[in-house]
Amino acid sequence: MSGRSALAALPLLEVVRGHAADPALLQLLDPCPEERSWIRLVATEDHELWLISWPAGAATDWHDHGSSSGAFTVLRGTLTEHTFDGGLQLVDHGVGGGKAFAAGYAHDVRNHGEEPALSLHAYSPRLTTMTRFKFHGDRLEVLGVERAGEEW
């Protein structure tokens, strides 16, 4: 089975949860960084996996993942996901929790806790752009588009 067929047959949330079972991931990034840090673990033609370390107070700000679908799961700590669908919604994701989402899904992920957090993310196809937004309380305003290899 090709990589594309294997990935299509398995939802991205299951992909990240399967990789999250590797205890070595907990040692790959500084558990107490001063700012959010990340490492790309896997990059194929069809998908990629990123490990992200979140110090207390870290946030992504509002963004989407362009034409990529995605999923994430929390390995350590708690992350709060902010979404907007006619109203602001907040969901806390603890260890083992996570979310899968379609292309164009906008959110702001934050570590509101006092302890660092660690999460694993998958994107398919590989990330090429991310749109940045400003949240106005009743709408999202597009600020610009970041491109892989230029802004991250």
Image (tube, rainbow, N blue to C red):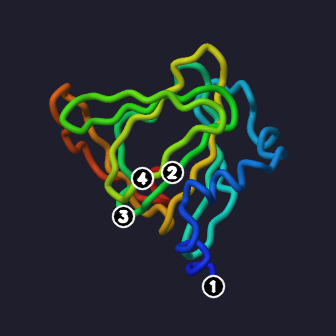
**Residue type, label 1:** Ser
Dot 2, crowdedness within 10 Å: few (<14), some or many (≥20)? few
Which label was assigned to residue 67?
3
Ranked by sequence position, the earlier of labels 3 and 2 is 3
Q: Nearer the viewer, mark 3 or mark 2?
A: 3
Q: Nearer the viewer, mark 2 or mark 4?
A: 4
Which label was assigned to residue 101?
4
**Depth order, front residue of 111/151:** 111
Q: Position of residue 72 (x, y in %)?
A: 55, 47
**Residue type, label 3:** Ser
Q: Which residue is mark 1?
A: 2
**Depth order, front residue of 71/65:** 71
Which label was assigned to residue 55?
none
Q: CA distance from mark 1 to mark 2?
A: 28 Å
Q: CA distance from mark 3 to mark 1?
A: 21 Å
Q: Secondary structure at mark 2?
A: loop
Which label was assigned to residue 152?
2
**Residue type, label 4:** Phe
**Residue type, label 2:** Trp
Pointer 3 and pointer 2: residues touching (CB < 8 Å)? no
Pointer 2 and pointer 4: residues touching (CB < 8 Å)? no
Q: CA distance from mark 2 to mark 4?
A: 21 Å
The mark tally for this picture is 4
